[in-house]
Amino acid sequence: MTFSCGFLIFPTPRASNPVEMMDAANRVMLQACQDHDLTAWFVDHFQFGRQPYLECWTQMAFSAGRYPGLRTGTLVLGVGYRNPALVAKAAASFQHLNGGLTLGIGAGWKEDEYRAYGYPFPSARQRLDELEDAVQIINGLWTNETFSYAGKYLSVSEAICEPRPVIKPTLMVGGGGEKRTLAIAARYADAWNVDYVKPEDFGRKLGILKDHCRDLGRDPESIAPSYFGLISVNRDPDKVVRVLSPNLPQNAYVLNGTPDEVIDQMREFRDLGARHIQLSFVDYPSTDGVKTFLEDVWPEIKE
């Protein structure tokens, strides 16, 4: 089983301003992804308070154009924000032009953002129904000359997506809901992602995902599990971030400590079955954590 890693490319400055953010810390991260064969990940939100926030597809396309061959992914698209046929078309075009795309998509959760931008915010059940419709539409457009589908909430009629991808983007379902989300991932996805949970919870959810696969007659090894987490790594233990800033999830599990400690923590996720880990550095906009990770951590655990 292969094991790989990627970086969250920040959509917003935690200090300075967006111009300096793109020209400094993000440039370091994107260059590191290209130089070390890591993946670059982009989050899909529109607003957090009044801080500047770059739109996911725009930032990803700009970054891929600046760093040709960059392997990229969305972490993860909110299903209610875009028509899924348009998402399929955009992803197919991106794959044709750049390659290396993981299309992550989930049911969405940020109610204030939905309402601020004029989107309806239906019940969790409906959002999950929409997600199940959406992944079928996306897969159908990628693999059929024409595709029609009439779902519970979403539909297409004789839709064409040319050029279809010769090699499909990886379709990744994000979320930890054990009854619906994991079942949708098991039935339709190439990969699954969950964020911020402790290793033991990751292992338990992965076990449930595999049970869903077996119930469907699918080989559990045919879906790639991944984990998105916060990280603080420093050679000096006193410089490790132990208290999260208010704009970060306060109950999130954090991979933190010296390089040796972080190596052990990442190996724990790997040994539980994670094939990929996406990392968000909590010391950003400093790039000290990125450099320490690349010099001391990644060489010890990459395969």
Image: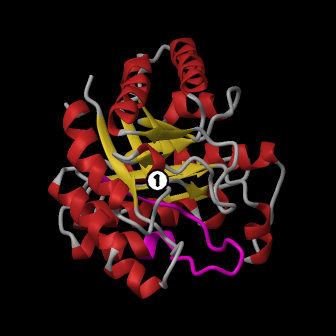
Res. 118 image quadrant: bottom right
Spot occupied by residue 199 in the image (x, y as percentages of width and height): 54, 26
The residue shown at (43%, 27%) is: 269
Looking at the picture, does residue 51 appear above or below residue 113? below
Q: Residues within 10 Å of mark 1 (few under 14, many from 20)?
A: many
Residue closest to the far right? 123
Q: Is residue 156 magenta?
A: no
- Nearer to me, 38 or 206: 38
Label 1 belongs to which residue? 280
95 is higher (above) or lower (below) than 200: below
Q: Residue at x 54, y 72 (%)?
A: 14
Secondary element at tag 1: strand
**Amino acid type, callout 1:** Ser
> What residue sits 55% from the left and 16% below the top?
207
Query: Taken as a whole, is the magenta stretch helix, strand or loop?
Result: loop
Q: Is residue 283 visible?
A: yes
* Residue situated in front as seen by the camera: 301 or 73: 301
Above or below, comparing residue 253 to residue 30 in the picture: above
